Image (cartoon, rainbow, N blue to C red):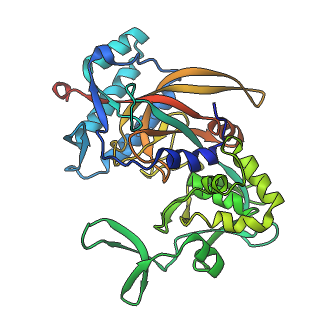
C-alpha cells in the first residue's frame, strides 16, 4: 500500500483518477442476495447522533425539494422517513442477524457505481480526513504571522445568465470579473482587513484550507473552532502533483512530512509552490469545537462521509465497506476490514464523481495520523425505505 498522508491523499487521488463528474450512472440497485452483510463495527450511539444531524438538515429543506437516485426523482420526505425508520430499528437493538434481515426487508439497496473504467466490483477509493488543531493568535505578532481570512467585501456572487450556475468573482464598477488567485490575494493584500487569526507557518494555513475546518489554540489555552465560509472560485490545483511532476520528490515518498521538510531545506521555493494552487478559502468562526460539514451540521467521527453531492443525495444513509488501520502506541499495528453505517454530510474540492468517498476520522494528531494512511479500495451502498413502508 502507498502510505501517503492526508494532505497527499487530498492533493493526489482525485488528480490521478480524474474529475470524472457524474456523467455515468451513479448507483446500481441490488437484490437482497447481492447485498453485503450489514454488520456494523461501531456502537450505535454515535450513529444515532449522526442521523440526528442529517435529519436536522433535511427538515429545513423546502417541502417540495427533490433528490435523484437511480434516475428516480424522489421527495425529500422519502429521505427523512428512511432515516426515521432506520433510527427506530437500531433503537430496538436487534441482533445482528435480525438487523440484516430487517434492512433487506424494509429498504431498497443501491450500490455506488465506483471508479470509472473496468470495475466489475464497483470499488471506490476510500480516503479519510480529520480536523487539525493549530496554534494561533488573534494578533499579528511573531511567530504568528500568517493570516486566515474571513470573507472580504470585494467578493461577489452572481448567477451566470446562460447556465444559471452560481459564479464567484468581484465587481469592478458594473463589470463582473473572476476573483483573484491565491498568489494575488497573498502578494497584493486583496483580503487585507479581514484577518481572523494568524498561524505560525504558511503550510499550516494551507493545510487548514485543504481540511476546510479546524481548531485554533490561542495563547492562554482558549480553543476556537473555525470553518469554511466561501472560496475564491478558482480551480483547485495539487501542490503534491506539481512537486512530483517537477522532480522535487517521488510519488511514493510524498507526504506532509516530506513536503514540510522540503520547504525547510528550500525556503525560497515555498511561496511559489503554495501559489501553484489558485484556489483560496475564506473562513468564519464557529460556536462549536466540532468540525462542520457542508450541510452546516456538526460531523460525527467515523460516521460522517464526504462525497460528490452532485452524484449522491445530501444527508443520506449509506453503508461503507473497506479496510482501516489499527493504532497501537502511536503506530499502525494492523489493518482490518470493516463495515459501518455512515451519513452523507460533507463534500470537498478533491471529491469528484461516484468513485470517491472520504471518511471523517476525528480531531487531533492521532486522528490525522490514522486518516493520513487511508487510501483503500471499498464499496458504498445507499439505503432507501421501500415505498410501501412510507
Residue 68 at least partly seen: yes
Q: Position of residue 192 (x, y in %)?
A: 61, 79
- 197 or 357: which is nearer to us? 357
- 241 or 325: which is nearer to us? 241
What is the residue that sits farthest to the left in this orientation?
Answer: 388
Relative horizontal placement of residue 344, taking residue 208 as reference (left or right): left
| Quarter residue 385 falls in | top left
Q: Residue at x 58, y 70 (%)?
A: 182
Relative horizontal placement of residue 361, taking residue 264 as reference (left or right): left
Q: Position of residue 179 (x, y in %)?
A: 48, 75
Q: Residue at x 59, y 58 (%)?
A: 209
Residue 108 at least partly seen: no
Q: Position of residue 87 (x, y in %)?
A: 37, 28
- 59 or 136: which is nearer to us? 136
What is the residue that sits farthest to the bottom in this orientation?
Answer: 173
Q: Position of residue 135 (x, y in %)?
A: 74, 57
- 184 or 18: which is nearer to us? 18
Task: Pick the quarter of the image with the C terminus.
Answer: top left
Q: Residue at x 37, y 15 (%)?
A: 99
Relative horizontal placement of residue 167, taking residue 74 as reference (left or right): right
Amino acid at each position: 500500500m502507498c502510505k501517503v498522508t492526508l494532505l497527499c491523499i487530498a492533493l493526489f487521488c482525485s488528480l490521478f483518477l480524474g474529475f470524472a463528474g457524474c456523467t455515468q450512472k451513479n448507483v446500481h440497485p441490488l437484490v437482497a442476495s447481492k447485498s453485503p452483510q450489514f454488520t456494523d463495527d461501531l456502537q450505535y450511539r454515535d450513529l444515532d447522533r449522526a442521523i440526528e444531524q442529517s435529519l436536522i438538515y433535511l427538515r429545513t429543506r423546502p417541502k417540495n425539494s427533490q433528490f435523484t437516485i437511480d434516475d428516480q426523482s424522489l421527495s425529500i420526505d422519502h429521505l427523512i422517513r428512511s432515516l426515521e425508520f432506520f433510527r427506530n430499528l437500531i433503537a430496538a437493538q436487534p441482533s445482528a442477524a435480525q438487523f440484516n434481515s430487517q434492512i433487506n426487508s424494509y429498504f431498497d439497496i443501491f450500490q455506488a457505481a465506483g471508479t470509472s473504467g473496468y470495475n466489475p466490483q464497483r470499488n471506490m477509493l476510500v480516503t479519510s480526513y480529520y480536523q487539525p488543531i493549530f496554534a494561533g493568535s488573534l494578533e499579528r505578532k511573531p511567530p504568528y504571522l500568517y493570516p486566515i481570512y474571513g470573507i472580504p467585501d470585494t467578493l461577489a456572487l452572481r448567477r451566470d445568465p446562460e447556465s444559471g450556475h452560481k459564479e464567484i468573482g468581484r465587481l469592478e464598477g458594473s463589470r463582473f470579473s473572476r476573483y483573484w488567485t491565491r498568489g494575488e490575494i497573498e502578494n497584493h493584500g486583496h483580503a487585507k482587513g479581514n484577518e481572523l487569526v494568524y498561524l505560525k507557518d504558511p503550510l499550516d494555513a494551507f493545510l487548514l484550507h485543504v481540511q476546510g475546518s479546524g481548531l485554533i489554540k490561542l495563547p492562554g489555552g482558549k480553543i476556537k473552532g473555525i470553518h469554511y465560509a466561501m472560496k475564491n472560485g478558482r480551480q483547485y490545483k495539487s501542490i503534491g502533483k506539481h512537486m512530483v511532476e517537477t522532480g522535487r520528490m517521488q510519488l511514493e515518498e510524498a507526504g506532509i512530512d516530506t513536503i514540510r521538510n522540503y520547504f525547510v531545506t528550500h525556503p525560497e521555493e515555498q511561496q511559489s509552490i503554495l501559489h501553484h494552487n489558485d484556489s483560496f478559502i475564506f473562513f468564519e468562526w464557529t460556536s462549536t469545537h466540532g468540525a462542520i460539514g457542508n450541510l452546516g451540521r456538526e460531523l460525527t467521527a467515523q460516521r460522517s462521509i464526504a462525497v460528490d453531492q452532485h452524484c449522491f443525495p445530501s444527508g443520506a444513509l449509506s453503508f461503507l465497506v473497506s479496510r482501516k488501520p489499527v493504532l497501537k502506541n502511536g503506530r499502525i499495528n494492523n489493518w482490518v476490514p470493516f463495515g459501518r453505517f455512515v451519513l452523507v454530510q460533507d463534500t470537498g474540492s478533491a471529491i469528484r464523481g461516484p468513485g470517491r468517498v472520504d471518511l471523517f476520522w476525528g480531531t487531533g494528531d492521532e486522528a490525522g495520523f490514522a486518516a493520513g494512511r487511508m487510501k483503500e479500495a471499498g464499496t458504498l451502498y445507499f439505503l432507501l425505505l421501500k415505498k410501501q413502508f412510507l
